[in-house]
Image: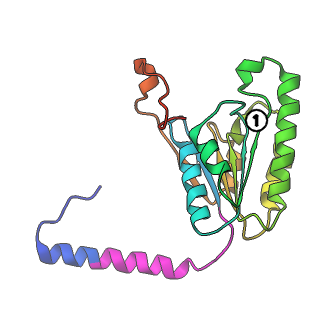
Amino acid sequence: MAKAIKDPEKHKERMKSIKAHVDKRIAKAQEDKGTFVLLTGNGKGKSSSALGMVARALGHGMKVGVVQFLKGEWNTGEIDFFKRQDNVQWEIMPAGFTWETQNRESDVASSEQAWEKASQMLSDPSIDLVVLDELTYLLHYEYLVEDDVLTALMNRPENQHLVVTGRGASEALIELADTVSEIKETKHAFKRGIKAQKGLEF
């Protein structure tokens, strides 16, 4: 981060220079199209960030589709809240976390079932925003064929926005995405013996 300039005139000149640079970039960025945002990394907050975008889209009267691939039957506040909203289609993969089922064949079947819902959303031009929560895990474990997934992401309607979350995103996903944020874990309460808290983590 640049050091603060305490001289008022020098500060003013720097801010003018920065504003001109930002204005120039904004003027060039006039393409209006569906954007693919990828949220990855080991830190907490990827799904929370995605759901913030869901709230933002709904605030604009947009139609949203969400598929949660690894949440299972885990009840969370956001599910209860967003399912009560108009303009939301919310799908949850039938099985829970992979280490709970301990059955690859069952996991693949559940993944394919959830992906079918996602595919329908990705081909529906009436859905303005699609969120595929924890999709990266299914590609990492090869529960889904990555080439098929990438093709569906690329062929979605031109103005449909897409958010994909999950750790360990593949190079192909990173390359395809328009915006990529890697969330780093510095500290986590769980490692200090604090369990997941209602209203904060579920």
Which residue extends farthest front? 84
Q: Is residue 30 above or below residue 159?
A: below
Q: Residue at x 76, y 37 (%)?
A: 139
Image quadrant where residue 34 sits? bottom right
Q: In the picture, which quadrant includes the C terminus? A: top right
Please report the residue visible at 51 percent of the width from the left and 35 percent of the height from the top: 201
* Dot 1 alpha-carbon crowd within 10 angstroms: few under 14, some 14 to 19, many 20 or more: many
Q: Position of residue 143 (x, y in %)?
A: 82, 33
Is 10 located above or below residue 164 in the figure?
below
- Judged left or right of residue 19, residue 85 is right
Q: Quadrant of the N terminus?
A: bottom left
Q: Residue at x 45, y 80 (%)?
A: 24
Q: How many marks?
A: 1
* Residue 138 in the figure: left or right of residue 192: right
| 11 shown above or below 52 | below
Q: Which residues are magenta?
A: 16-35
Residue 144 can be seen, yes or no: no
Q: Residue at label 1?
A: 138
Q: What percent of the width, then of the height, locates residue 8?
A: 12, 74
Residue 91's quadrant in the figure? top right
Could you say which is closer to the camera, residue 144 or residue 13?
144
Residue 74 or residue 33, whichever sits in front = 74
Q: What main secondary structure does the magenta stretch of the protein show?
A: helix
